[in-house]
Image: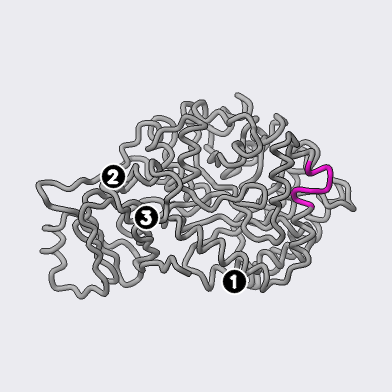
Amino acid sequence: MRLWVKHARQVVRVVSDADPCREYLAGPAQENCTLAILEEENGIGLSIIIDQEGFIADIGYDDVMELKYKNHLVEKIIDASGRSVLPGLVDAHTHPVWAGDRVHEFSMKLAGASYMDIYEAGGGIHFTVNHTRKASEDELYNLLKERLMRMLANGTVLVEGKSGYGLDTENEIKMLRVLERAKRELPIDISSTFCGAHAVPKNQTAEEATQNVLTRQLPEVMRLQELGELHVDSIDVFCEKGVFDIDQSRKILKAGRQAGLRLNFHADELTPICGTEMGAALGAEAMSHLEEISQEGITAMAVKPSVAVILPTTAYLLRLNPPPVRKMINQGVPVALGSDFNPNAYCLSMPLVMNLACVLFGMTLPEVLVAATINAAAALGRQETNGSLEVGKYGDLLILNAPKWEHLIYQMGDIQQIIGQVVKRGRIVDRTV
């Protein structure tokens, strides 16, 4: 065995083999989730055993595990006495590859400038595009590496990473290659998303930008995918008034679907333009933001359903209306969480995102843990390997320096102290990198 975690006071599985719903939790299943928690009994703690391939081999009480595995060799043992163990976190929406910070825009926002004010003045995405285009692959990789390792130190073991600061074929491919390198070299799992329709380039109309994505960018991404040089999971578009309208967004998403990509896109963030209804009609696996979603949009998302990826940092920093999370959960839409890490929302900590979701959006502690584990994994199509502690899934664990898992959210702002160890596929992550 690669790793044996012994004597834990509490193991939070999130879902288990006994749960009727295991791929994601929606409606009453998310609202009333018991998290399949195992607790120490009569002084007997809990064990998790991870095999040589990095998968969970067994979970149970110490005495049973000692008898069952007494003759097995174990590379590493962790004494988790008095501590809690839960699945590694999943960040379902980030923009991690870019150069050129936008700290100067924070003052503009505090003075009352809106997202679109900054965007139309040439700031925002356009500012980042200029710097990202000038940066080399090595420069972008070194920036990405430091960000991803900080995410890992804060408990994130699987992250969705978008392109989108290139806006032309050469630079979008450059960003995707950087993500590909990180997959090979870093101890964190990455789901890549092609987001060439993140903004309209300054020298193009929205229709021209749409055609560029359809006829140049997407075909080249898929050509490299067929060659095995890229491994892209999803396609994204910023479906928004003043960016890509409903018809343009639909064309891009349909082309992505025909190319075999999942649909995971920005919808109804700043204005209510019925992006969610359009996405639901296309069978989108996930949609993000949703601050301005309509009642009809919620109903449409609940049919398949489509995972709602909620981004508390964005609503907080841009002072947007909060998305109607309670309505979504009540009506059967599975809710997930993402940090929306980008130059506009510089947050690498999913536990802080979870805290904000509780305070700003009225989510409960169990709801946000579900949203940052199994439901976030489902948004990325990774629920078979990530998002819960189950036999056969990746041995990705957080071992907390606390007897109860709620401390991960309760102890706000001191995350790397409350997290004792981050374990990725049975190996302890060096968080000093």
Identity, as a three-letter code, of the amino acid under mark 2: Lys
The x and y percentages for residue 325 are 52, 31
Examine the rendering and report whether any part of residue 394 can be seen: no
Q: Residue at x 57, y 67 (%)?
A: 145
Nearest the viewer among 46 and 257 is 46
Q: Eyeballing the image, is 8 above or below 297?
A: below
Examine the rendering and report whether any part of residue 318 can be seen: yes
Q: Quadrant of residue 65?
A: bottom left
The quadrant of the picture occupied by the N terminus is bottom left
Asked whether 328 falls inside the magenta stretch, the response is: no
Residue at mark 2: 404
Residue at mark 1: 181
The x and y percentages for residue 291 are 62, 32
Residue at mark 3: 419
Q: Earlier in the sequence, mark 3 or mark 2?
A: 2
SS for callout 1: helix
Crowd around label 1: few <14 · some 14–19 · many ≥20 (10 Å): some
